[in-house]
Amino acid sequence: MNQSLHPLGVPPNAWYVNESIADLTRPEMPARSITLQTATKILRLDLNKSALIIVDMQNDFCHPDGWLSHIGVDVTPARSPIVPIQQLLPILRQIGMSIVWINWGNRPDLFNISPATRYVYNPTGTGVGLGDPLPKNQAPVLEKESWAAAIVDELEPPESDIKIDKYRMSGFWDTPLDSILRNLGKTTLFFAGVNADQCVMATLQDANFLGYDCILLEDCTATTSPEFCLQATLYNVKQCFGFVSDSIQLLDGIKTSIKVKN
C-alpha cells in the first residue's frame, strides 16, 4: 500500500492523506519575523502570516477618463499611491507575501446593488451612475471586466496575485475575502489604495472587527475627499483599529531581516 501522504488544501490549512491516514495537524509554517516602525508602536510581526490588501486602484477612481473624473472630481490625489505601490510590490512578491486586490466589479444587471448604494454619486438619478456608460469610451461604470473597473495600467497585476470583486465599500461584505485569508493563515493585513476614508477604511474596520491585525500604509493610500477626511481616517486607525506606517518602513523592516535582491 502506498503510504506517502498527499496534501489536500492550501498550506497552512491543509490535510495530508493517503488510503489509511488523514493527518489533520496542519503544521505551522516557520516564522519570518520583522520589526516595523509605526506612528505609535514598534511592531514585531510574521511575514508568513501577512498579506497586502490593495483597494480600488481602478480606472474609474484613478484615471483621468474614469468615472470620478467625469463627475468633476480631481483624481490627482488618487494617483499618488501608484508609485509607492509600484516600488513595494516587487519586493513583496519576491519574499512571497500574498497580494490581494479588492476591486468594485459589479454584475451587469446590478441585481445585488441596493438603491442606497446606487445613490452614491448619482443622487438625482439622472447622472452617470453604476453600470451606466462613460461618455468618453462607453465603458460601464465599475462593471466587472470593463475598462472602467480594470486596475490602472501602471499596477496591472500578474495572475499569481489574488483578485476579489466587491460590491460595497467594504471588501469583506458578501465576498470570499475572509475565507481566503483564513485559509492562507493570514492574521496581519497591510492596507493600501483609495479612497482612504471610504472603501479602504470600511474594509480595514471590518478586518479589525473580524480579529485581523491592521496596518495602514499611509504613502500607499490616498483620497479625493477633503484633507480633514484623511486626517480623521489616520486618527481613527491609530486610535481604534490598528496602526499607521508606510512602505519605506515596511521595506526597511524586510531588508533588515530578510535577504532580498535589489
Image (cartoon, rainbow, N blue to C red):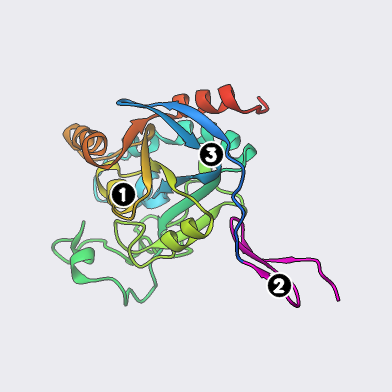
Front-most of 5 and 66?
5
Q: Residue at x 86, y 76 (%)?
A: 1
In the image, residue 171 sits, relative to residue 82, either above or below, namely below
Q: Is 109 placed above or below 131 here?
A: below
Mark 2, Cα crowd under 10 Å, few <14 / some 14-19 / many 20+, is few
- Residue of label 2: 21
Q: Secondary structure at mark 3?
A: helix
In which quadrant of the rendered image does the C terminus lie? top right
Q: Residue at 43% of width from left, 44% of height from top?
A: 188
Asked whether the viewer can see residue 257, the reply is yes
In this figure, which residue is indicated by the disc labeled 1?
A: 208
Q: Amino acid at mark 2?
A: Ile
Q: Nearer the viewer, residue 241 or 150?
A: 241
- Taking the image as drawn, is residue 64 in sight? no
Which amino acid lies under the numbered mark 1 shown in the image of this protein? Asn
Q: Is residue 173 above or below residue 89?
A: below
Name the quadrant containing residue 64. top left
Q: Mark 3 — residue?
A: 47
Residue at the spot 59% in from the left edge and 33% down from the top edge: 91
Q: Is residue 7 magenta?
A: yes
On the image, the x and y values in percent for residue 149 come to 42, 57
Q: Amino acid at mark 3?
A: Leu
Q: Secondary structure at mark 1?
A: helix
Q: Which residues are magenta?
A: 1-23
